[in-house]
Amino acid sequence: MSASGIDPRPNLLGLDRQELAAALAPLGEPAYRARQIWDAIHLRLALDFEAMTELAKPLRRSLAEHFRVTLPAVADRHLSQDGTTKFLFRLDDGATVEAVDIPDRNRRTLCISSQAGCALACRFCVTGYWGAGRDLTAAEIVGQVWAIRSLQAIEGRLNLVFMGMGEPLLNLAAVRRALAVMAPTISPRRITLSTVGLLPGLEELGRWPERPNLAISLHAPDDRRRSELMPVNRTHPLPELMTALRRYPLEPRRRLTFEYLLIAGFNDADRDADQLAALLRGLPAKVNLIPLNPDPVLPHAWQPPAPERVDAFRARLERHGLTATVRRRRGDDVAAACGQLRAFGREPRGFRRSQLSL
């Protein structure tokens, strides 16, 4: 153990098969040992070297001396009335992140974090109220998924969404490594990265030979209102973002998802739906409408539209030829719904402004 109290042994959880083989090479083991160990960790969730009984005892002792397989510690968990479970994970250095397990009939969706906090300060997102943290490592990203898999005994189809804490395009190297580790068990087609639309990150992501699905946090159909909600829009305004997205490479039959938060009296009028449809015209796109999830740190004047207004907004988009869905609110009784993840443990920073131009 180091002076900081952090175990200095490399965590094998964040290594893909090739990286694992390279890490084991100094031990003089044949290449197939890496495959055996990788399968034990990622297929059987064997997190203790002693449980890897296909390996000889001397090798197990050597592995334990040089490496570890460590999941993030579960500091807390909350079960919603709808079956959603929110987890608070504590990492080796004391940082905390939240992740959510969302059951839906015969499949599960895990909403995971890429950073311990977020520096982007989107006004509707409670994570931003607590301010920036640090990037997660690939092992910490994979660890959230594997921890929930082991605790919840998840079987069947599993989808991942990077819609928890943090901006994945600000931690793209670790996200890419984590996806490579999980790729043999979770196809990139069942993984979605949600981003505010950072142009350098989008360009890098577009160069990947195999890419996950992409969801863009849009939330307003014009620069003025998007800048009020999302300070990043002042750096990457809508015209530049839309130009980049029209260049973004998409495989056949894949579409971009645009997430659109609905706030009563701010961006939910018929003319806003018309303006949004015009903005997305010609793109292979679908719109995910998200009625605002209120939270005590958000202004009391902010409210979701009435259900009939949400339905009217969706129907108007559909009349323009867009595919539009309304995200079901899941886990809001335990603050696990969209925009509510916070991971306590430090002083809140607060938002720069207290009101929108409603």
Image: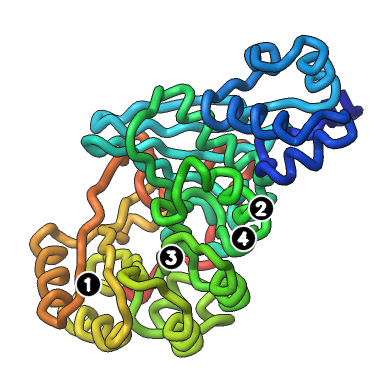
Report the front residue among 284 and 242.
284
Question: In the image, is residue 337 above or below residue 351?
Answer: above
Q: Secondary structure at mark 2?
A: helix
Alpha carbon separation for disc pair 3 and 2: 17 Å
In the picture, residue 301 is in which quadrant? Answer: bottom left
Query: Which marked residue is nearer to the observer: mark 4 or mark 3?
Result: 3
**Contact between labelled residues 2 and 4, with CB atoms less than 8 Å apart:** no
Front-most of 183 and 311? 183
Image quarter for residue 198? bottom right
| Residue 158 appears left or right of 104 | right
Query: How many marks are shown on the rendered structure?
Result: 4
Q: Which residue is mark 2?
A: 174
The residue under label 3 is 214
Q: Residues within 10 Å of mark 1 (few under 14, many from 20)?
A: many
**Which residue carries the number 1 mark?**
268
Disc 4 is placed on an element classified as: loop
Rounded to the nearest angstrom, the CA distance separating label 1 from label 4 is 27 Å
Instruction: Classify mark 1: helix, strand or loop.
Output: loop
Q: Amino acid at mark 2?
A: Ala
| Image side of residue 65 versus residue 14, left or right | right
Residue 108: x and y in percent read 33, 38
Residue picked out by circle 4: 119
